[in-house]
């Protein structure tokens, strides 16, 4: 897998050089080197031909250990629940809530993206 990523990046660099370009922070492929996995997950989700930095920045929601953790975080961020584990919050079926929420979101390797 790492070798494929290195080859992909090498091909991209060759393309940049052929076109007289240098590394560009706004280039989605140049950003794939940052080591956090976000760009790689985004490219895997949308495909290289559709990948662009502005779109990735707009739809990226964060990294979570599970759909349920993502659903809890979204509920807290939107103000639908307060950040605590008191009753009735521990009675919520977070698996079901996450299932409903994931109709509008996608997950790749723990990274969550809003569907457009």
Image (cartoon, rainbow, N blue to C red):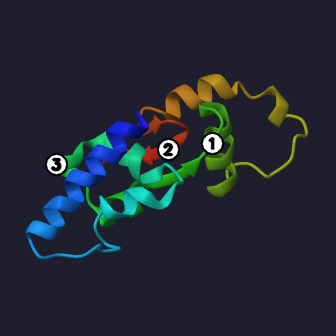
Q: Which residue is mark 2?
A: 112
Identify the element where label 2 is drawn. strand
Q: Which residue is mark 3?
A: 49
The total number of labels drawn is 3
Q: Residue at x 81, y 51 (%)?
A: 83
Whether residues under marks 2 and 3 lie with C-beta atoms below 8 angstroms apart, the answer is: no
Q: Residue at x 28, y 44 (%)?
A: 7
Left or right side of 115 for 38: right
Mark 1 surroundings: few (<14), some (14-19) or many (≥20) residues within 10 A: some
Q: Residue at x 51, y 44 (%)?
A: 111
User: Which quadrant is the N terminus positioned in?
Assistant: top left
Q: CA distance from mark 1 to mark 3?
A: 26 Å
Left or right side of 83 for 106: left
Left or right side of 97 for 30: left
Left or right side of 45 for 2: right
Q: Which residue is mark 1?
A: 64
Q: Residue at x 8, y 71 (%)?
A: 19
Query: Whole-percent x and y of residue 108?
Result: 46, 36
Foreground of the two, 95 or 60: 60
> Earlier along the polypeptide chain: callout 1 or callout 2?
1
Query: Whole-percent x and y of residue 14?
Result: 17, 60
Whether residues under marks 1 and 2 lie with C-beta atoms below 8 angstroms apart, the answer is: yes
> Earlier along the polypeptide chain: callout 2 or callout 3?
3
């Amino acid at each position: 897998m790492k070798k494929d990523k290195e080859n992909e990046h090498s091909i991209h660099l060759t393309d940049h050089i052929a076109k007289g370009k240098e590394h560009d922070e706004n280039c989605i492929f140049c950003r794939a080197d940052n080591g956090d996995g976000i760009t790689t997950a985004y490219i895997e989700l949308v495909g290289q031909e559709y990948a662009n930095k502005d779109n990735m920045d707009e739809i990226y929601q964060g990294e979570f250990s599970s759909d349920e953790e993502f659903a809890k975080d979204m509920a807290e961020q939107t103000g639908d629940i307060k950040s605590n584990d008191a009753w009735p919050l521990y009675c919520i079926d977070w698996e079901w809530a996450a299932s409903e929420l994931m109709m509008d979101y996608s997950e790749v390797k723990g990274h969550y993206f809003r569907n457009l």
